[in-house]
Image (cartoon, helix red, strand yellow):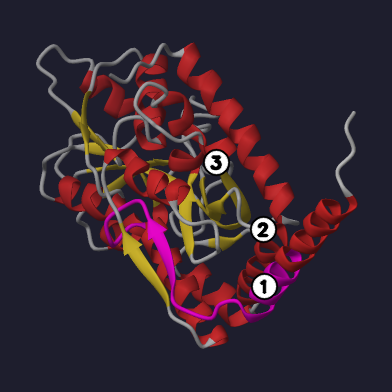
Amino acid sequence: MRKLPIVKMLGFLLAASVAAGACGQATDTYPSKPVRVLVPYAPGGATDIIARHITTKLSEATGQQFIVDNRAGASGNIALELAVRAVPDGYTLLVGNVSTNAINETTFTQSLHAVPSRDLVGITNLIEIPHIVAATPGLPANDIRQFIELAKRPDSRINYGSAGIGTYPHLDMVVFAKAAGINVTHVPFKGGAGQMVPGLIGGEVQVMFVNLASSLPQVRAGRMKALATTAPQRLPELPNVATMGEQGYPGIGTNAWNGMFAPVAVPKPLIQRIYGQVVEILQRPDFKEMLARQLMTVSISASPAAYTEFVKAETRKWANVVKENNIKIE
């Protein structure tokens, strides 16, 4: 193998040293300008809510603005691809969830130009949220058994909402409908729970899987009702609502997670710095209590590497769900 001249070798070493020093300096001073935090849904849903809470506290802690940028549409893929294409300097982050960062990779193979498990790195999980099966108050069913009986009537015309084709509220209903032997019509909303909930309240859809944080105030106000919860045990907020497992459908329904991501080429020291800044906020007792009042449970990853591996495992799990149910998205 031909050896490099000593002068050229020293040049390479000097360039590498300068680059490493610049990276270290950038990490030490981060953030030195506003940071854009992409959210793949419209305002009002759980992903948007946690993004706004965490960016507010990051702005206070660092003295720089962390600005939420809602980019709804295409089942979250618009924001996902913007994050992947962003300059990998730590000044564009993404708050994603199980749909955008674990499911879409399989369901949108033909149209998604990014590969989330390859093109993004996880920083940390943020929260987990239980879900319910919600229905309009006028639907003549108060639990899963009654809902199935209603859906099996020859004249039944039931629409269900989701955050978009291929999102987990869509897949959860596909799995449930197959298990229950019913036919229901899918109505996708591009803006997540922020549009799903008004769609159900307005009667555009009659039922949906939706997170408790976005739906409990409406349940308590009588604008929607809960047919079931997806948690392993009954929720203290809805003690009289049986779980899916209690009603004969264990394992159906997702308790969703939300996390923070960055382009994969962001230097590891910078990822670690962002991780430390976010975790410091998530660990504050007052912050945890504030989120708990909104039915969000803080769930911190052990490290960015651990979170990245968790998301990859989730991606494989949901790929199996899609294949087993022959779900195709054109």
Q: Position of residue 30 (x, y in %)?
A: 60, 76
Does the magenta segment cover residue 131? no
Q: Position of residue 166 (x, y in %)?
A: 36, 30
Which residue is at the front of the view, 280 or 38? 38
> Do labels 2 and 1 touch, CB within 8 Å?
yes
Between marks 2 and 3, how big is the CA–CA gap? Answer: 13 Å
Q: Position of residue 280 (x, y in %)?
A: 67, 75
For badge 1, the amino acid type reads Thr
Crowd class of label 3 (few under 14; some 14 to 19; many from 20; radius 10 Å): some
Which badge, 3 or 1, comes first in the chain's sequence?
A: 1
Crowd class of label 2 (few under 14; some 14 to 19; many from 20; radius 10 Å): some
Q: Which mark is residue 119?
A: 3
Q: Which mark is residue 267?
A: 2
Which residue is at the front of the view, 101 or 198? 101
For badge 2, the amino acid type reads Pro
Q: Is residue 32 above or below residue 22?
A: below
Which badge, 2 or 3, comes first in the chain's sequence?
A: 3
Between marks 2 and 1, how big is the CA–CA gap? Answer: 9 Å
Please give the name of the residue rendered at 25% of the width and 16% of the height, measured from the top-left corner.
183
Left or right, residue 217 beside residue 264: left
Between marks 3 and 1, how big is the CA–CA gap? Answer: 21 Å
**Image quadrant containing the C terminus:** top left
Left or right, residue 14 beside residue 158: right
For badge 3, the amino acid type reads Asp
> Which residue is tagged 1?
27
Stretch of the chain drawn in magenta: 20-45
